[in-house]
Image: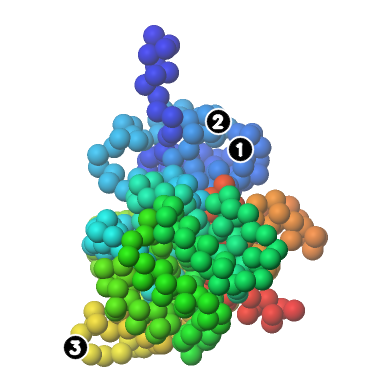
Amino acid sequence: MVMAELESIPSKLRLSTKGLQQVDARLKQLGWRKQSPCWAEVAKVAVITLKRFRGRERLTTDSFQAICRALDLDWRSLSESGYPQRQQDPQPPPSPTETGFELGEKWVHRDVIFPALVERLQQGCRVLVIMGIAGVGKTVLAEQLSRHRQPTVGRAVALNFEVRGNVGFVDTAIHCLEQAGQRVNPTERQDPQQIMHRWLALLVHEPQWVVMDSLEVLLVGDEEQGWSVFKDPLWAEFFHQLLGWESCQSQIIVTSQDLPAQIQMAGLRYRQAFYTERLSGLSVPLQAQLFARYGFESGDALAWQYLTRIGAAYEGHPLALQVIIGEILDCYDGDVRRYWQRYGHEIKAAEAQQPSGPEPALRLDRYSRTLRRTVRKRIEDAFIRLRQDLPEAYLLLCLAATYREPVTEPFLLSTLRRRDCPEQRCQVALDTLLDRNLLEIGPQQRLRQHNLIRSVALDHLQSLN
């Protein structure tokens, strides 16, 4: 009997919608916050795990049960039934892939673009470039493709130039060669052409799934003026030669806000091996999916109308929408009407910034400077409100920008503790940043900022200094 019961319990459990209501009611009775250290200590889990629990991500059965026991609640009454094979949930939160990527808990599937790109890759596309403004979802789409395609291609190589910085071509090539187990002697390091030849030979003859994220870091220019050529001309030569090979075992996914003309010209010559996807914001149906995943319902017609206007005002820009959603949930308990009463004028101002024209879909595809400025202003407004509401959270957000790579929770909070911030205030600051989608949980439960958030935070940190 006991064995039969154990076998029926899945390895991972997820909190149901009704279960979340029970949990919040119980937390209120106990006087605990959403990610209370007391709750984490009793359950013997990390505070971030509590965030994932309330975010309705799938946790291991042991962690799920321990969290429920800490609240003196029956885990069976809180968990969803019949998953992870639930048929009504077509987009379960995926697990990290071998590339080290992990999709966010509220990501939405690009149901039109994704299958088309998969088909191109299956047909032999060698270099796939995903272009779009910051925060539009380029990296997430690359993660989706990696999760689906990489296991059938070969060894995964992840190159995030936002993290690595403005590294030269030779350093990157040597890193990839050494990752593949190939030694590079000091003499070869002095010969860029030989290094390039070796890396090209590796890609051509051994299957590699390479993701180059934030390629614009390697280009001359900036977000305001745009980007042009590579800072290191060896990169242009590398792509030209890679596309020119008759066959290649590897595939490369590139995400970038812009792309040099010399690569696009080479792409025109090798159309079968090269493709560029210009990514715009989420479509109206995908925006509705995003709102629904955060718990908003279309039953309240006026609130849903406000959400629809917000989505249209920011042209479906995923990061801008998530920041707004975070404020609605954290500051107004999900009451869209109250949020609109307070900040509806900002949405109307964003609507007024949209250029007029008979072809809005074509306009979205141009990634106008107006949209860049509108989105950045939205992030700036979120920073200003955070500074007013909770200065410690604002300071933590600015300090987090000094780290290019994801960091652990204790390490990040230590930046506040060194400034004599009380432990409880430190935890409240972290919870606020997570709730408002200004900080996100990455692989191995490490904390990270989106590139656009980090860019704004660095500007604010400079002002603080």
Q: Looking at the picture, tell me which residue is in the foreground, 451 or 420.
A: 451
Outermost residue toward the top in this view: 1
Work out whether mark 1 precedes mark 3 in sequence or the reverse, and give the earlier one.
1
Name the side, left or right, on which 297 lies relative to 57.
left
Amino acid type at circle 2 is Ala
Assign a secondary structure to mark 1. Answer: loop
Tell me where residue 439 appears, x and y as whole percent. Answer: 55, 61
Q: Amino acid at mark 1?
A: Val
Of the residues tagged 2 and 3, which is closer to the observer?
Answer: 3
The residue lying at 29 percent from left, 78 percent from top is 269
Q: Amino acid at mark 3?
A: Pro
Query: Which residue corresponds to the image point at 37% horizontal and 70% vertical from the top-left?
Result: 243
Q: Is residue 37 left or right of residue 52?
A: right
Q: Which mark is residue 358?
A: 3
The residue nearer to you, when weighing 228 against 431, is 228
Locate residue 452, reporting x and y percent: 52, 73
Pointer 2 residue: 66
**Residue 361 x, y percent position in the rendering:** 24, 79
Label 1 sits on residue: 45
Residue 460 visible in the current orientation: yes
Distance from Cα at disc 1 to Cα at disc 2: 8 Å
* Quarter of the image that includes the C terminus: bottom right
Q: Is residue 22 left or right of residue 450?
A: left
